[in-house]
Image (spheres, helix red, strand yellow):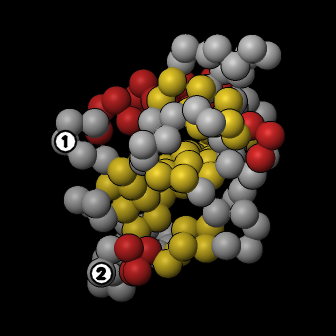
């Protein structure tokens, strides 16, 4: 796991000269052969972006499409204002969406199905959102 600033060159080239560089807030790379002195060469396994007013549109649309095209297996968009996490898992070239947040037992119907978000690239790991959004 790496945190910004950490360069990710999404489209790997043999000479490692990719000029499409992004700096996600958090990156998980399971294939260590993608790592070099400049960061990650190729799609990481997981990317997490934390929304802010200045980056929200870019994270939801521009980066979403870039990560999808590059083959990022799991993309999380964390919205501290909601508080919630949108989880996108790559499946046959498309992102399948899931939404997680603090479940309020008084909400009917519940806005979120769970306040624990599973991490598909690390089977068995769940993030308890109550620890992130107190």
Question: Which residue is outermost to the front?
Answer: 37
User: In which quadrant of the rendered image does the N terminus lie?
Assistant: bottom right
Asked if the residues shown at circle 1 and circle 2 are in contact, with their CB atoms under 8 angstroms apart, the answer is no
Residue 7 or residue 97, whichever sits in front: 7
Residue 77 or residue 105, whichever sits in front: 77
83 lies above or below 74: below
Q: Is residue 11 left or right of residue 55?
A: right
Residue in the image at 62% along x and 16% along y: 18
28 lies above or below 33: below
Residue in the image at 72% along x and 56% along y: 121
Residue in the image at 80% along x and 40% along y: 33
- Is residue 41 something that shows in the picture? yes
User: In which quadrant of the rendered image does the C terminus lie?
Assistant: bottom left
- Is residue 89 something that shows in the picture? no
Q: Position of residue 35 (x, y in %)?
A: 70, 40
Q: Quadrant of residue 15?
A: top right
Residue 128 or residue 1, whichever sits in front: 1
Label 2 secondary element: loop
Q: Position of residue 108 (x, y in %)?
A: 34, 75
Please give the label number shown on residue 53: 1
Q: Position of residue 32 (x, y in %)?
A: 77, 47
Specify few, some or many for label 2: CA neighbours under 10 Å numbering under 14, 14-19, or 20 or more: few
Question: Which residue is outermost to the left?
Answer: 53
Specify few, some or many for label 1: CA neighbours under 10 Å numbering under 14, 14-19, or 20 or more: few
Residue 5 or residue 118, whichever sits in front: 5
Q: Is residue 47 left or right of residue 123?
A: left
Q: Is residue 52 left or right of residue 5?
A: left
Mark 2 highlights which residue?
A: 134
Please give the label number shown on residue 87: none
- What is the spatial separation of the Cα atoms under label 1 and label 2, in whole angstroms? 21 Å
> Earlier along the polypeptide chain: callout 1 or callout 2?
1
Label 1 secondary element: loop
């Amino acid at each position: 796991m790496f945190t910004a600033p950490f360069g990710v060159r999404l489209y790997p080239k043999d000479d490692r000269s990719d000029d499409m560089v992004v700096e996600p807030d958090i990156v998980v790379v399971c294939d260590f052969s993608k790592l070099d002195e400049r960061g990650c060469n190729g799609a990481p396994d997981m990317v997490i972006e934390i929304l802010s007013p200045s980056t929200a549109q870019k994270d939801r649309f521009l980066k979403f499409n870039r990560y999808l095209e590059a083959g990022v297996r799991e993309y999380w968009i964390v919205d501290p204002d909601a508080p919630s996490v949108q989880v996108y898992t790559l499946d046959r070239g498309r992102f399948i969406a899931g939404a997680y947040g603090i479940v309020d037992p008084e909400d009917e119907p519940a806005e979120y199905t769970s306040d624990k978000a599973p991490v598909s690239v690390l089977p068995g790991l769940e993030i308890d959102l109550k620890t992130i959004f107190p």
